[in-house]
Structures are given as structure tokens and as C-alpha cells.
Amino acid sequence: MSDTIHVLNGPNLNLLGTREPGIYGAATLADVEALCRDTAARHGLEVVFRQTNHEGALVDLIQAAAGAAGIVLNAGAYTHTSVALRDAIAGVGVPTVEVHLSNVFAREPFRHHSYLSPVVRGVICGFGPQSYALGIAALATARQARA
Ligand code: DQA
């Protein structure tokens, strides 16, 4: 059984730390990566951590995670627009947790709908970088249950 979790980040998440800090906080994407690696290590898991601004590249990254223990996915704005990402998650068959730094349900109505939520194991939003850590912990627990 794979011991690797793929943490995949979509558009504009490379700007964390300077992007709308009142919404997304001061942590950079490098800080989020360090948190993910620490959290995964405590569960005996490895992390592949990636970011892209391009929808098709995100499809490629989801497909490249085939066989992994899980995917933690913050698809950014593509969450609310992308059938292609939804089909990639459904097609690859890897347990996936959709995460968001902000509480999307407390924001504009167009952020309330996710094309991804129906095909993921669960959704965690609103806890800043901890949303990622909680997602990794959830996947680690699910993986143990399968072992
Ligand atoms: C986000 C929420 C999305 O609505 C937004 O487009 C993002 C970031 C979050 O992490 O809170 O880019 O996914």
C-alpha cells in the first residue's frame, strides 16, 4: 500500500502570504508545505507537494497521483468551475479530501457550489493551513482502516 499523499494546489495559491491576507492569512505556500510534511511524517507518510495555475496541469497532477494513499486538493477557483477536475478525481479513484483555507460558505454565493465535493471523501474548509493538516490526518486514518 502506498505511503504517499499528494497535496495539490491550484491557481493563485503561489501568492499565499501576500494575497488578500485578511482572507487567506500570512502563511506562505512554503509554510503550508512544511505543515503538510510535518503532519504526514507524524503519520508515517510521505508528501508530494505541487502547485499550478493551469487547469489542465492540475488534471495531469491528479492523474499522476494514481495509486497514492490519498490526495489533498485545494483547487482554488477551479473548485467552482471545473468539470474536468471533477472527472479526473472520479477517474483516478484515489481517496481525495477537498480543502480550502477560507470558509467558502461564509463568502460570495459563487463560492458555495463545488463541482468537486460530490466525488471526494470529504471537505474541510475555514481553518487556514490547518485545513490541509486535518485533510492529511483524515486520509491517514482512512488508510489505517483499509490496512
Ligand atoms: C480557496 C477558496 C476559493 O474560492 C478561491 O478561489 C481560492 C482559495 C481557499 O483556499 O479558501 O483560490 O480555495
Image (spheres, rainbow, N blue to C red):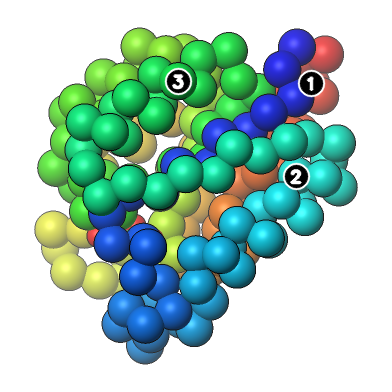
* Mark 3, other Cα within 10 Å: few <14 / some 14–19 / many ≥20: few
Tell me what residue is drawn at x 44 percent, y 79 percent.
Answer: 17
Q: As rendered, which of 107 and 52 lies closer to the eye?
A: 52
* Three-letter amino acid code at the position of disc 3: Ala
Gap in angstroms between the C-alphas marked 2 and 3: 19 Å
Q: Position of residue 95 (x, y in %)?
A: 54, 24
Sequence-wise, which precedes: disc 2 or disc 3? 2
Q: Left or right: where does residue 27 sit relative to residue 3?
A: left
Q: Left or right: where does residue 107 sit relative to residue 17?
A: left
Q: Which residue is mark 3?
A: 64
Residue 140 lies in what quarter of the image?
Answer: top right
Q: Which residue is mark 2?
A: 40
Q: Position of residue 145 (x, y in %)?
A: 79, 21
Identify the secondary structure beneath mark 3.
helix
Judge whether 22 appears above or below 1 on screen: below
* Three-letter amino acid code at the position of disc 1: Ala
Identify the secondary structure beneath mark 2.
helix
Residue 69 lies in what quarter of the image?
Answer: top right
Evaluate whether residue 138 shows in this view: no
Q: Which residue is mark 1?
A: 145
